[in-house]
Amino acid sequence: MPKVLISVVTHNEAHDVERLLPTVFAQTFRDVLVLGTDNNSEDGSRATLAAAQKASPVPFEIRASRENLGFTGAHNSAMEKALELDAPWVLVLNADVRLAPEFLERLLEDAESPRHARVASFTGKIRRAVGPELEPSPLLDTVGLQMTANGRHFDIASGAEDDGSFDRPAEVFGISGCVALYRTAALQDARISTGFYDDDFFLYREDVDLAWRLRGRGWGARCVPSALAWHRRRNLPERRRLMNPIANLHSVKNRFLLRINNAGREHLMRTFPSTFGRDLLVVGGCLTVERTSLYALKWLAENRERLLQKRAEIQGKRLVPDRELLRWFDGGLPGGRVQDA
């Protein structure tokens, strides 16, 4: 039984995964199983994984899917494998990531502290990587997720200079799925009929949905800055018009799915003045400048009965009421984090 199952998912990312895997193999913590899932790539990603498997110093398995399962489906399969193996931890990685050699060791030192037994997810200080070689930069990419009252979410400190302001561990609402260590028991606890990650999301915002569901079940999230990694961020709000139309479509769909799944009545009432205006802007954008995303609204309407049933499932599992979770949404936590004393 490995202590950590490392899940790497590729979809036409052969060059990136070729840069990532040596940093996975160089980890000082060795009790791992690497599971590489290829989502029906056409660029040789499957061959890249096979070559890495032959040279791997740790156990390495490959799954080749004949269809694109999305970020959610592929990682859900890996999480299921972790449960089957009784592995206590799952490390989810994007292909466009590089890890410092002690990344996993430092993260587990914090994660396995008895004080953090009710913490479900951990991330490190993730800096930006740039260019095709994933070159490290001094800018921060994410140190956790910050929620807002108008239905948006952001990566804390994204694009800021790493000036040491985020060098102390902190509690955060949740963590970005680009580099995420999850406690398998917490994943099992928050699992719903559509998976650990909600498979309706397919890609984009699925990490925020899981963070919200975990919070609703009483689990926490932490950033451990001594664990370093680098991530090349492609999708940013200011680049929206340059993004893949499929990603934009899922972004629109999943903005509404987040609240359908997780926002209770008190949350909806308290945030309505902020969310309604933003929702009008999103719908208006779909009707005018981003008509490729109109299908997102059609999909939501066509699936409304099933989505409401899933909402009832999630709300029925909630242990923490809206009034306790709202502090993460109303700006009451400066910077969206609670720093260790």
Image (tube, rainbow, N blue to C red):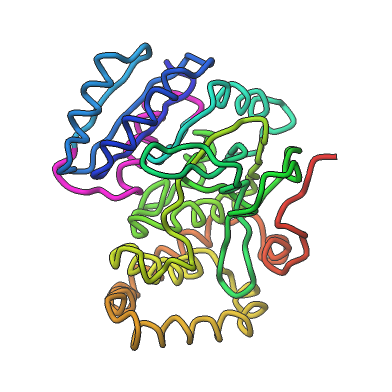
Counting from the top left corner in percent of width and height, residue 105 is at 59, 21
Question: In this view of the protein, which residue sits in the foreground, 61 or 166?
Answer: 166
Residue at (35%, 84%) from the top-left corner?
289
Instruction: Quarter of the image for the N terminus: give it.
Output: top left
Q: Going by the picture, which residue comes out furthest to the right?
A: 341
Magenta segment includes 97? no
| Image position of 69 (left or right of 271) | left
Residue at (46%, 69%) from the top-left corner?
255
Magenta segment, principal secondary structure? Answer: helix
Residue at (64%, 53%) from the top-left corner?
160
Magenta segment includes 80? yes
Which image quadrant is residue 25 in?
A: top left
Residue at (25%, 48%) from the top-left corner?
69
Counting from the top left corner in percent of width and height, residue 219 is at 63, 45
Is 87 situated above or below 31?
Answer: below
Region rendered in magenta: 65-89
| Image position of 301 (left or right of 267) | left
Question: In this view of the protein, which residue sits in the foreground, 69 or 159?
Answer: 159
Q: Going by the picture, which residue comes out furthest to the top?
A: 57
Is 306 situated above or below 224?
Answer: below
| Image position of 338 (left or right of 174) | right
Counting from the top left corner in percent of width and height, residue 278 is at 53, 81
Is 117 situated above or below 162?
Answer: above
